[in-house]
Image (spheres, coloured by chain):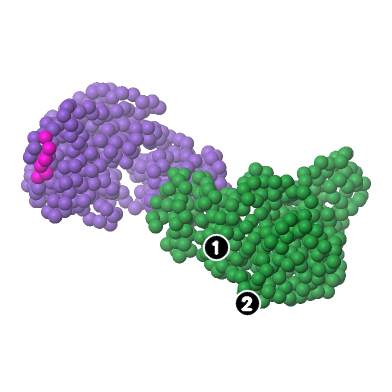
Chain colours: A green, B purple
Amino acid sequence: MNVVDAIVRKRNGETLPDDLIRGLVDGYVEGAVADYQMSAFLMAAFLRGLDGAETAALTDAMLRSGTVLDFSEIPAPKVDKHSTGGVGDKVSLVLAPLAAACGVVVPMISGRGLGHTGGTLDKLESIPGFRTDLEEPVMHRQLAELGVVMVGQSARIAPADRGLYGLRDVTGTVESIPLIAASIMSKKLAAGLDGLVLDVKYGSGAFMQDEADARRLAETLVGVGVANGCPTVALLTSMDVPLGRAAGNWPEVAESIRCLRGEGPRDLERLSVELTAEMLVLGRLEDDIGAARSRVRRAIADGSAIERFRLLVEAQGGDLSVIDDPDMRSGAEPVFDVRSDVAGIVQSIDAREIGLACVAMGAGRALKEDGVDPVAGITLNKTVGDPVGRGDVLARLHGSDLDRVRGVAERVASAFRWGPGTPSQRPLILGRFAAGSWSAVGG
Amino acid sequence: MNVVDAIVRKRNGETLPDDLIRGLVDGYVEGAVADYQMSAFLMAAFLRGLDGAETAALTDAMLRSGTVLDFSEIPAPKVDKHSTGGVGDKVSLVLAPLAAACGVVVPMISGRGLGHTGGTLDKLESIPGFRTDLEEPVMHRQLAELGVVMVGQSARIAPADRGLYGLRDVTGTVESIPLIAASIMSKKLAAGLDGLVLDVKYGSGAFMQDEADARRLAETLVGVGVANGCPTVALLTSMDVPLGRAAGNWPEVAESIRCLRGEGPRDLERLSVELTAEMLVLGRLEDDIGAARSRVRRAIADGSAIERFRLLVEAQGGDLSVIDDPDMRSGAEPVFDVRSDVAGIVQSIDAREIGLACVAMGAGRALKEDGVDPVAGITLNKTVGDPVGRGDVLARLHGSDLDRVRGVAERVASAFRWGPGTPSQRPLILGRFAAGSWSAVGG
C-alpha cells in the first residue's frame, strides 16, 4: 500500500476501498504508517468525511487490531448497551443486572469518566472492594454463571483505537461523527455481541449539542453495527437535565439500587426499562417490544433484578452491606445543602453545569491521571416543574473535601432556571433508529 | 499558544492571525509542535486554504527560522529570479551574468533537479571544477566584486521550510498553492533582496498543468513578496515544449554559452532578455521596460554578458577552457541520433516526455540521493514547425552510459507530435502580474 496515495485520495474527496483503509490501520499499528501520516489522514477524513462503508471498514480494522472476545460457548444471546454519555446517566448500573435477570447475557466493557460526564467504571469502584479488572477466563466463567460482567477495557481490546484516539486528541480531529462512531463501535464489537443497543444523547449535558448531529451519529453507529454483522438499534434521548436525581459516583450507585428495587426516579426507570426491553428483542427473547417491557418491569417488581445486582457485586468482590443499605456507605451522607435565594417554579436544570460541578468536587477528572472521590456528588432535591420557596433546599452535596464541596454551591444554585409557570420539556426518548429508519417510541 | 486550538480554527475555516501562524512555525522548529500536529495543520490548510495575509505570515515565519542574508553593504540593487521549473529551462545561467553585466547584483541561491525538470546547481556542476558550496564571506566578496554569485542553499537558510517540505512530501500536502508559495518565497526572501522576478510556467513540462492554477500561484507569490517588503513581478510563461534546443546538464550549459554570445535559440533569448529587463526595472536601473530590454540586448551584443559568465566560472573554480570552447568538454559529443520513421511537420514536442527521457539517461534524479551524469541530455535537431522527412535526425543524444542513452531513443521519438500543416502555438510569454493586475507583454 502507498500511504501517501491513500492520504491524497481521501484529501481529494475520493471514497477509499476497504483494503486501503485496512492497510492504513494495520500499517499504523505495525509502525509502517507514521503518526504524522495518520494525523494528516485523520484531518482529511474529518474534512472530506467517510461514508458508511468506509466507517464500517475503519471500525472493522480497528477492532481486529486486538483481541476479539468470543462468548459463543454461552448459548444465551449476548447483548450490550452503549451510551454516548450524559450527566447522571447511571442506566448501565440498572440495565446490566436487569437484562441478565431477564435472560440476556451482558458482557459490559465500560470506560472511565472524562470531561463533565461520569464513567461506569468509576461508579462501580465507589462500591468498596468492587474490582473491574477481571482476567478473561474469570469474565467467561462469571458470564456463564451470572449472565453479567462489568469490566474495564483491557489493553488488548482495539489497540488501534487507543492510538488513534490519542492522536485525534492532540491534532484537532475529535469531533468527527465517522471517527467517533468507529472509535465507539470498534471497542463494543470486540466483545463478540449478538446485538447492541445505543443510547445517543443530545442536549446541554451531552457531547452532542445539536439534534441533527446526534441523529447522524445514531445513524452512523447503527450502520457500522449492522455492516459488521451485529444487529444494532439506537434510541435518541434528551440530555438537557440530569438523568434521575443523583450525579457523582456513589450517589448514582445508591440511586441505581433504589431503581432496581422499583423506587427509582421515573425518568431513570423509564429509560432503563426501554433500553433493556430493546436488548430482549435484539436477543430474540421477546418478539414484541411491549411484551419485553412487561417482562423487564416484572424483573424489577419480583426482586430478581436487585438480586442479580447483589450477585454481580458479590462476584466482583464488592461489599454487599452497602448494597443492602446504601446509607451505611461511609461518607455517603450529604455534607452541605444548597438553598434557593429565589422563589419560583424550576424551569430547567443545566445538566452540563451539574456535571462540571461534580468534577470540581472531585467526582470526575480534569486529567486522565487524576483520581476521583468516590462519594462526591449531588442529589437534586428539586427538579423541573417543582415549586420552590425562598430558603428551600435545592440540592444536597456529598464529598470528602468540604472546601471543594462548598466551592461549587453557587454553581449548583445557578444551574437552576426559574420562571413563573409550568415549564415545557422535551420528551425523554425522542426517537428510535433501526433498519434504516426513524420511528417514535411508545410505552 | 494552544496548538490544538490553532489546528481546530484552521480546520473550521477561520483565518488565523499572524501571531498564531508564527507560533506554529516557531514551535515546530523548536520541537514544541509535533510532526503529527504540523501535518494535521498542513492538511487543514491544504483543504481550507490560506489567504494572502496568512501565506505572507507563514513565509515570514519560515524565512526567519534561519539566517537572513544581508548584502546591504553593496550599494547596487540586489535582484534575483525564480522559475517554477520547466524542461530545458536554463534561463538562470544566461540571466544571472547578463543582469550583473547590466549593473544588477544577483545573489542567486538555487536547488538541484528532482522530477522531470533540471536544477541550476546540477547544470553549473557539469562545468568541471565549478563549486556551488561557497562560504558566506566568500559569497559576499564575490558579489561585491563581480555582482553575481550562484550557490546552493545552505542548511542555515529557512530550516523550517526543509522540515515542512519533508513533511508535506510524505503526508499528501504538496500541491497547495499557498504552501508552495511560502516554500519558494521563504528561501528567496532570505537572500535579502531589493526585488524578485518570477517565471511561473505552465504546460506539459511544468509542475502546473493548468493555466488558472498557474495564475493563482503567480498572484500568490507576488502577494507574498510585496507583503514582505520585496517588490515582485511575475511572468506567466508557456512550458509545452522544451525551452531552447538542449535538455540535460552540460547540453544546457553549452546552449547558455551560445545564448550569452548572441547565438542562442530565439525562445531562450527572448525569455532571458525579458526576465533580465524586469530585473533592471525592479532594481531602478531603468524606468522603462523597453529601454531595459535594449540595455540587456546590448550587453549580449557587446560581449560583456559572456565575459561576466567567464568571470563567474573562474571565480567559482570552473574550467574556462570548456566555456571558451564547449565542444572541448570531454564526453560532450552526441553518441546516438534519433531518426524519424515518419514524414510530416512537427506540431509539438512533449516537454514532459523529453524531461523524463533525460532523467532516464542519468541527467536527473529518481531519488534525492542519486548522482547525475553531467553530460547526459538531448539536443533537439528539429523543432515545432519544422518539416521532417523519413530518416531525418530528430534529436541527438548525449551521455556516458550508451545503454541508458539507447534505452530512451524510442521515448524521445514518441515525444514528437506530427501533422500535415503549420502548427499553432501559444505565445511564450502569456502575461505579466504586478501591482495587483495582469497585463500583456510586448517586446
Q: Is residue A21 left or right of residue A279?
A: left
**Label 1: element kind:** helix
Q: Quadrant of the N terminus of chain A?
A: bottom left
Chain ID at mark 1 = A
**Label 2: element kind:** helix
Residue B88 lies in quadrant: top left
Which residue in the protein does label 1 denote? A63
Q: Residue at x 74, y 55 (%)?
A: A289
Residue A304 visible? The answer is yes
Which residue in the protein does label 2 denote? A137
Residue B301 lies in quadrant: top left
Give the CA separation, mark 2 to mark 1: 20 Å
Residue A425 lies in quadrant: top right
Ranked by sequence position, the earlier of labels 2 and 1 is 1
B216, A46: nearer the viewer = A46
Q: Residue at x 44, y 44 (%)?
A: A12
A97, B48: nearer the viewer = A97
Q: Position of residue B386 (x, y in %)?
A: 13, 31
Q: Which residue type does callout 1 highlight?
A: Leu
Q: Which residues are magenta?
A: B337-343
Chain ID at mark 2 = A
Q: Which residue type does callout 2 highlight?
A: Pro
Discs 2 and 1 carry the same chain letter? yes
- The relative height of residue B29 versus residue A306 in the rendered view (above or below) is above
